[in-house]
Amino acid sequence: MDKLIITTFGGFSLSYNGVTFSEFSRRSQKMLLLLEYLIVHKDRDVPRGELIELLWGSQKGADNPENAHVNALKTQFSRLREELNRIVPGKNVISSKVGSYSFCPDMEYYLDFEEFERLYKQSHGLSDISDKAGLLVCCFNAIELYHGDFLHSRAGEHWVVPLNVYFRHAYIKLVIKAIEILEEENRNDEIISLCREALLAEPGNEIIKNKFAQMTDLYNNALKEDKGKVSDFDSVIESLTEDSSDKGAYYCDYEGFKKVYSHELRFAERNDRGVNVFLLSITDKEGRIPEGAALSSAMGSLSRIITANLRIGDVYAKFSPSQFMMLLRKTDDDICEMILERLERCFTDERIKGAEVLVYEFQPIV
């Protein structure tokens, strides 16, 4: 059975059966505010007066049926139900009683902050029984859900601030706990990757910044020590080829991509060899960038597809949260179009229940 999927970290989105709406076409911010507020307070019926104050500020006699805003509130909920019915046809998401409203969908639903909270509490129980492997998996699962501030666009609202502080604190504790376990197992490369991802979500956290700097220094020092050793030629060749079993395109970070690009540009100019640069972007069907778990899942799918469908000599990197860049050698325009059509077809097939669209462009660099 399809679930109603609601994500709140890094932004708000609601999707059902492959149809996703992040901001309800921006037609009414009041509709979106009502929905977000009811979801956050899903465990209670929210009085009508409280919602009137949310939308229009403190009002004398806000809960009086004669208050002009009562009818305006009914109109907002009528529009909201109409909008939700386009996403979840024939299903009820908002329930109303005399003088109150509530989020009460008559279907299964998934809330990312509810799952995050469950995993965070579970991590405490696993700490008590010293299950390090289970605790690490639990931490990673929760960390993967966090894509930034809770209800980012409402971060300054009085009803969001305490929740934002709580979830940020929980996220940082989970990251630090995962780092501690990885340190015990000398998994330094994974610590660096975890810190790098965590700093994208929480760039100002000094504990994570310091740990990232510490582990990066250790890695660089170890690299210098290895380079200072005298090795025979066979050992050198073995060290160069030990990872050569990887198939498909090569993934690197954007700094590495820029260096490859610079090298290829010089080489192409000297040898009159064609090189093309591609930009692949993920949007929804209305041209907006997806948010939260939907974007993360779509980018993961696209990365796997690029690796599997390009040649070993091709290179790609993440350019932004919703974009990859690719560099392909010796490809004319017809081949470029064919490659892009294949990637688009594979992406569409894999994301058949998703609402994401792959947009692409390319140009030769010589």
Image (cartoon, rainbow, N blue to C red):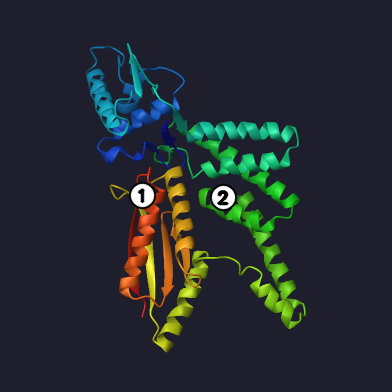
SS label for mark 2: helix
Disc assigned to residue 46: none
Q: Position of residue 126 (x, y in %)?
A: 70, 34
Question: Of tags 1 and 2, which is closer to the observer?
Answer: 1
Disc assigned to residue 198: 2
Q: Residue at x 60, y 56 (%)?
A: 193
- Sequence-first disc among 1 and 2: 2
Q: Is residue 58 visible?
A: no
Q: Position of residue 268 (x, y in %)?
A: 42, 83
Q: The disc labelled 1 sits on which kind of residue?
A: Ile
- Residue matched to label 1: 289
Q: CA distance from mark 1 to mark 2?
A: 21 Å
Q: Is residue 216 above or below residue 142?
A: below
Q: The disc labelled 2 sits on which kind of residue?
A: Ala
Q: Residue at x 66, y 43 (%)?
A: 136
Q: What number of labels is visible?
A: 2
